[in-house]
């Protein structure tokens, strides 16, 4: 990992150390170490059940997951101490794998309330209706979203692709420092995938970091990561450059799963 | 039986009451007598009776209430401001009696009558006698019988054939009480003749901890092809009792759109009954009830499909907090021969606390073979998943819950066609819900 240098101090935006998480008594994350610096794009790949989504949800503050060990420092804060909304206001964004439908809550107005909560936290004044509409129209273009989706309730009756695009749209409006994308590519056709990837690429900047969680290598041809991690059985078993994704694509997860069980067997012996 | 009823405090001064209306024409007097006899025979309902199993009226039966018609207790128009609606003809009743000094009538189209029942009995006795008490059943309904025994005043509307009344007509019933609890029996008769159209609002309101009992009966008659929009707003004092019956009677191809909004009162029971008597009728009965603390609110719906090709829609939603209780009991009764009936009933409840409780019981009784009837009932808490989703966007937990609660209630509000009522209810929710300012911005 490449923490970037600020002044004389090595500085990672996000630093996860030996993070252990249980759900209903079962250990899902068995000691995760991860450092993400400003401007970096990290991909986390892994088979089903490896703990990728759990990591994403824990970072966003899901209370059902019990952190049993380790620490997460984000922008100098003990992230695990903050409620989900505080994390969002500090610039953390999670794009859901399965965005939630919320009938009766307008996609646009709710987003305005969210943006204003974040602005208030930053000590900025509330955005007025005209500026907000301008912002919304600009960001909508980014994900080629149909204007009709603005006036509908949040994700209500949206297609799978529309929901994923709506997540990227929310991200673009809320302008986070660290965005965690949880399988945003899953289930998308190639056109929708390109739109989502273009949206993310347009937002890449030296100030913003991304953690892109994906099951498939395909997304990483469009969003080229700086670092690729492979998660198996609740651990990061390998990290490398973007070539690692290609290697995985070729050899399949079985290759690394075997390595892990092999190692475990060796320990047991 | 008579002896039992005499011991009921509500009937204690019945003779005094009867003396005040002694000069009225005999059909009305007969009706009162019938009501009194019926109530004497029925007595107060107990929880051993099926229709009252979940609602205990002991506090009313054992309470002591005095009639106090027109006692203002210092009321002024300024004090009633929160209950007024803009651009309406407004008639204010205090403890069941018209208070002209608080009312604000407006010019209505020729032939339209919007007045008090007392005046209608004096001025239009035949019109009143033709309809009053012809629709609301008292046989098995003790409180409707009690109301009938005390018929004196209430809302009266008559819209002649083919007349469209643009100005909504608002009847505001205010309950007041001093040291002693009071009782009133508003009796409302709304008549829309053939091909007419009108919007009528009945509001029931009170202040602070005033203890009183309101026992209204409303009869609504929609003539052939008439369109009636009706709203009942129940915002009684938090210590008041409110037990009401509404019976609508629709004739061929008429359209009734009736909303019941309920958030006041300690103990509230609404019997809302609709008779779809002839072909081609549309009847919408929607409702929203909000309860908290120890409030108890009960809706008993009964829709009679008597004729073919009629549609009825019911959407009732409840939001419960604290250790409040709600009862919903909805029957759709499809009579023999009422083919092509399309009846839909839905009751949804949102529980915001562990101790709140809902008893929901939708029922279909169908005696025709070519009908479409659906009913559904759900009761649940806010979805954790949705709360979390909103929080990950920066919305605080309390605001997220309020936003979802508002969205739940909004489904009923969206159907409200009278903008001033809709806006008023939205504002009410923004004020009532924690972090309502965030909700106001987010919807």
Image (cartoon, rainbow, N blue to C red):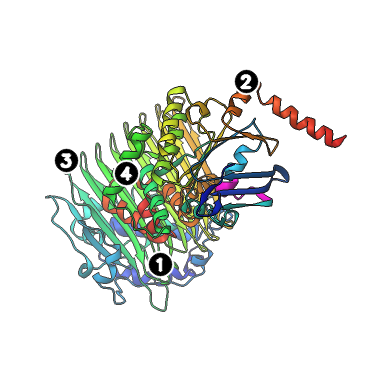
Q: As drawn, is B360 to the left or to the right of B159?
A: right
Name the residue tied to disc 2.
A250
Q: Residue beneath label 3, please?
A: B162
The residue where tag 4 is placed is A135
Disc 3 crowd, CA 10 A, few/some/many (<14, 14-19, 20+)? some
The image quarter in which residue B162 lies: top left
Q: Is residue A259 visible?
A: yes
Is residue B140 at all visible to an observer of this figure?
no
B30 left or right of A103 in image: left
Above or below residue A162? Residue B87 is below
Toward the bottom, the furthest residue is: B179
Which chain does the numbered disc 2 sit on? A
Residue occupying the point 20% across, 70% down:
B101
How many angstroms separate mark 2 from mark 1 (CA)? 73 Å
Q: Which residues are magenta?
A: A58-68
The image shows residue B252 at horizontal and vertical percentages of 28, 34
Q: Are marks 3 and 4 on the same chain?
A: no
Q: CA distance from mark 2 to mark 3?
A: 79 Å
């Amino acid at each position: 990992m490449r923490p970037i240098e600020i002044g004389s101090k090595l500085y990672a935006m996000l630093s996860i150390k030996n993070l252990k998480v249980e759900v209903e008594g079962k250990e899902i994350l068995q000691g995760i170490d991860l450092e993400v610096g400003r401007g970096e794009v990290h991909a986390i790949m892994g088979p089903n059940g490896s703990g990728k989504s759990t990591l994403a949800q824990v970072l966003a503050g899901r209370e059902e997951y019990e952190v049993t060990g380790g620490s997460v420092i984000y922008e100098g804060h003990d992230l695990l101490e903050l409620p989900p909304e505080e994390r969002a206001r500090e610039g953390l964004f999670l794009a859901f794998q399965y965005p939630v439908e919320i009938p009766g809550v307008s996609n646009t107005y709710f987003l305005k309330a969210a943006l204003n909560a974040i602005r208030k936290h930053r000590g900025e004044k509330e955005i007025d209706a005209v500026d907000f509409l301008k912002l919304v129209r600009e960001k909508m273009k980014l994900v080629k979203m149909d204007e009709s989706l603005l006036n509908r309730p949040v994700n209500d009756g949206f297609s799978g692709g529309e929901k994923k695009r709506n997540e990227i749209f929310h991200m673009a409006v809320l302008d986070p420092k660290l965005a965690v994308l949880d399988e945003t590519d899953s289930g998308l056709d190639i056109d929708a995938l390109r739109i989502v990837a273009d949206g993310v690429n347009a937002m890449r900047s030296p100030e913003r970091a991304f953690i892109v969680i994906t099951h498939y290598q395909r997304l990483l041809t469009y969003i080229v990561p700086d670092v690729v991690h492979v998660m198996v059985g609740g651990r990061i078993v390998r990290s490398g450059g973007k070539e690692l994704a290609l290697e995985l694509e070729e050899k399949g997860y079985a290759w690394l799963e075997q390595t892990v069980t092999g190692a475990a067997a060796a320990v047991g012996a | 039986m008579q002896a039992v009823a005499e011991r009921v405090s509500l009937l204690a001064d019945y003779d005094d009451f009867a003396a005040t209306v002694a000069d009225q024409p005999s059909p009305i007097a007969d009706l009162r007598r019938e009501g009194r006899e019926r109530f004497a025979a029925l007595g107060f309902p107990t929880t051993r009776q099926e229709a009252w199993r979940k609602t205990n009226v002991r506090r009313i039966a054992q309470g002591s209430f005095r009639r106090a018609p027109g006692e203002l207790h210092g009321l002024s128009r300024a004090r009633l401001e929160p209950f007024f609606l803009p651009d309406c003809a407004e008639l204010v009743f205090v403890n069941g009696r018209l208070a002209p000094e608080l009312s604000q009538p407006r010019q209505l189209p020729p032939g339209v009558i919007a007045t008090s029942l007392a005046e209608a009995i004096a001025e239009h006795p035949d019109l009143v006698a033709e309809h009053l008490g012809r629709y609301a059943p008292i046989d098995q309904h003790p409180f409707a019988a009690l109301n009938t025994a005390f018929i004196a005043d209430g809302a009266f509307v008559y819209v002649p054939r083919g007349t469209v009344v643009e100005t909504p007509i608002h009847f505001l019933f205010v309950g007041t009480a001093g040291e002693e609890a009071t009782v009133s029996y508003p009796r409302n008769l709304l008549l829309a003749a053939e091909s007419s159209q009108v919007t009528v609002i009945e509001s029931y309101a009170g202040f602070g901890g005033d203890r009183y009992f309101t026992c209204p009966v409303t009869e609504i008659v929609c003539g052939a092809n008439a369109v009636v929009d009706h709203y009942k707003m129940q915002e009684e004092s938090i210590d008041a009792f409110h037990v009401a019956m509404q019976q609508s009677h629709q004739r061929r191809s008429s359209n009734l759109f009736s909303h019941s909004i309920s958030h006041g009162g300690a103990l509230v029971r609404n019997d809302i009954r609709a008779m779809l008597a002839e072909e081609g009728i549309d009847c919408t009965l929607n409702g929203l009830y909000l309860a908290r603390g120890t409030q108890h609110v009960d809706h008993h719906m009964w829709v009679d499909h008597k004729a073919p090709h009629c549609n009825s829609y019911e959407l009732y939603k409840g939001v419960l907090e604290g250790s409040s209780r709600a009862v919903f009991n909805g029957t759709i009764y499809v009579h023999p021969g009422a083919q092509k009936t399309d009846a839909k009933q839905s009751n949804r409840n949102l529980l915001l606390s562990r101790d709140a409780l809902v008893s929901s019981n939708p029922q279909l009784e169908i005696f025709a073979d070519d009908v479409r009837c659906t009913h559904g009932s759900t009761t649940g808490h806010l979805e954790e998943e949705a709360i979390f989703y909103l929080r990950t966007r920066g919305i605080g937990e309390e605001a997220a819950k309020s936003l979802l609660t508002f969205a739940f209630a909004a489904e009923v509000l969206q159907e409200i066609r009278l903008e001033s009522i809709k806006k008023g209810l939205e504002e009410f929710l923004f004020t009532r819900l924690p972090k309502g300012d965030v909700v106001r911005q987010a919807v």
